[in-house]
Image (cartoon, coloured by chain):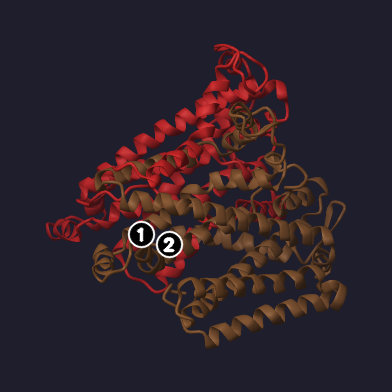
Chain colours: A red, B brown
Amino acid sequence: MKRSPLALFAGLYLIFLYAPIILLPLFAFNDGTIIAFPLRGFTLGWFADLANTPALHEATLNSLIIACSVAVLATCLGLFAARAVTRYKFPLKGGILGFIMLPLVLPEVIVAISLLVVLMLLLPDLPIETGFQIGEYVIVLSVTPDLVLEVSNFHRTVFSFALPLPIILGHTLLCLPFSIAILQGSFQGLDQSLEEAALDLGETRAGAFRLVILPLVTPGIIASLLICFIISLDEFIIAFFLSGNEPTLPVYLWGQLRFPARLPVVMALGTILVTLSIVLLIVADIFRRRGLRRTGQSETGGFL
Amino acid sequence: MISPPLIYALLLLAVPLLTIILFSFWTQNFLTIDRTFTVANYAEALTDPLYRELMLRSLRIAGLVTAATVLLAFPIAYFISFHVTPEKKALWIFLITIPFWTSYLIRIFLWRVILAYDGPVNGTLLELGIIEEPLSWILYNANSVVITLAHAFAPFAILPIFVSLEKIDRSLLEAARDLGEATAMTFIRVTLPLAMPGVLAAVLIVFIPTVGDYVTPRLVGGSGGTMIANMIYVQIFDLSNRPMGATLAVLAMLTVTITLAWFILHIRFWVHLSDRVGGGVLGLALAAVAAVIDIAIVRWVFLHGPDWFGPAGSLGVLAAIMGGGAILIAWFVPKGRWGI
C-alpha cells in the first residue's frame, strides 16, 4: 500500500468510524461519575454494579429469549427464500424478493408503528386461548399478545413461560433481508449436479437436501443465526414501540440514559454488548468465509 | 419455496402498512377510535406550519446526511477498490462494517459525549489552540444530528459504491490513459460515470431511513434537531392520537417517495443539460445552476405557497409543477448514461 493522501484519508475515516467504540471502554473503566475527560483512574466498580441490578437481568433474559427466537425464525424463512431464489425461476421473482427486502430501507419507525397499529386493532380480541388436559395437568397456550405457555395442575401453576411475540415477529421481519443475503451467498455457488446425483442414486428430495445441500450451507446458516441474533439484540425502535411492561436490553438502556448517575453503568453495559457483538461478528464472518470456500467461491467481503 | 417468507412479509409488512393507511383516515376520541372515514387528519397535517416545518427539516437533515455520507464514502470506496491489494480488500470491508453491528443506542449516545461542551473534540481543538473557547454549535442542533447519522450510515454508503467500482473493467481506464487522457480527466469522464449506479444506490439507502430516524434527533438533536419521527412518537404515545401519528407516517413515506422520484428524474435532466454543452466545467456549472433553480422553485412553493394560493391551492400548484416536470422529463429527456 503506498502512502498517499487517499490512504491518510482512509486512516482518518477509520478513526471517525471507531471513535465511539474506542471511547466506550475508557469511560466504562473510569473511576468518575461524570462521562467526560480527564479520566480519573481505573475501576471495575461499574461492572460490579451491573451484577446487582435485577431489572437489568430481567431485561437481558428477555432480550436473549427474543434474539434466539428471532435468529431461528428468520434463518428458517431465509433458507426458504434463498433456496427459491437461487434454484428456481418463477414469475415476479424480482418483485417478490424486493418486497421481502423492503425492511432494509424502510424507516424503522414506520415498520414499528404499523405493527403497533395492527396490534392495537387485534387487542380487543385477545387473549386467544387454547388448552387441553393430560392427566391432572392442564396445559394452556394463549396469545395475550405474548405467547404464553402455562402448565398447571388443579392446585397451582407448575410451569409458565412467556414469549414476547410482537417483538419477535417485528425483529424477524427486520432480520429476514440479512439472513437471505447471507444464505444466498451460500446457495449461489452450489453445484446443482451434486443434488441431481443424489436424486439419481435413489435419494428422496428431502434426503438429498438433508444429506447433500444442508452440510454445504451449514456455515451460512450459522453465520445467518449469529447475525440475526446480533441485530435483534441491538434493535431498539421496534422493541421500544411494542414492548409492554417487559423491556428488552436496549429499551432498558434507553430508560437509564435519562439518569446522569447511571451513565457509567450504562457505559460498562455498553462495553459488554459491543464486545459481544464484535466477537459474534468475527465468528459469523469466519463461518461465512468457510461456507463460501466449501462451495468453491472466492471471497467478496462484507455482509451487506 | 418462496411462499413461507412471502406470506410472512405479506402478513407482517403489507397488512400493517395498509392498516396504517386505513388508520390515517380515522380519528381518535380520547380512548376510542372513531371509524368514520375522514380526511381531517390530512387537512390538519398539511396545513399546520409545525408539521410542515418538521417535514421540511427532516428532508433537509436527511439530504445533508446523504450528501456528507456519500461524499466521505466515495474516496474510501475508491481507495479500497483501487489502492488496496486484492487479498486485503475483504479485511478492509470487514473493518468498515464492524462499527455498524455494535449497539446503535450506545454509538449515538457516545457522539453526545464526543461532541459535548467539555468533550474530546472541543478538548483537542482547545489544546491545539485552534479555537479560543469550546464550540457550542456542534451539539444539540441539526449539525450534531448530521454528524451522528453520517457516522451511523457510513457502511450503507461505502458498500454499494465499492461494489460498483469493483465492477469497472480496468482496461477501460488504461484505454483512456493510452488515448492521452490525464489521470484526473480519466476519473471524471470514465470512473465517475461508471460508479454512478452505486452512488445512486447509496443515496437511496441512506436517505430513506434517515428521514425517519428517531433516536439520533432525540439524543443529540436538542429542540432544533427534532424530526418527523419524534413528532410521530409524540402523537402516538404522549398525545394518544394514533390516527394522527399514522397520518404523519403515511405522509412521511409519501414525501420521501415523491422527493426521491423528483430527484432522480431531475438528475437525468441535469446530466442531459451538462452533456448538451459538451460536459466539462461549463456543463457542470450549467447543471448546478439548473439544480439550484429547480430546488429553489419547489422550496418556495412549499414554504410560501399557502400565502399565495391557499393551503389546498398550494398543494395543487406543487403537484402540478412536480408532476408536470416529471412527465416532461420522462417524455423528452432520453435515459442518460448513468442508467436512470
Eyeballing the image, is A299 above or below B183? above
Eyeballing the image, is A207 above or below B135? below
* Labels 1 and 2: the sequence-earlier one: 1
User: Do we see residue B175 in this rendering?
Assistant: yes
- Identity of the amino acid at label 2? Gly
Drawn side of residue B144 relative to residue A196, left or right:
right
Eyeballing the image, is B327 above or below A107? below
Host chain of mark 1: B
The circle drawn on residue B198 is 2
User: The residue tagged with tag 1: helix, strand or loop?
Assistant: helix
Host chain of mark 2: B
Q: Position of residue A286 (x, y in %)?
A: 30, 38
User: The residue tagged with tag 2: helix, strand or loop?
Assistant: helix
Mark 1–mark 2 CB contact (< 8 Å): yes
Q: How busy is the neighbourhood of tag 1: few (under 14 within 10 Å), some, or many (20 plus)?
A: many
Residue in the picture at 39% in, 58% down: A81
Residue in the picture at 67% in, 17% down: A33
User: Do we see residue A144 in this rendering?
Assistant: no
Q: Position of residue A123 (x, y in %)?
A: 71, 50
Question: Dot 1 corresponds to which residue?
Answer: B165
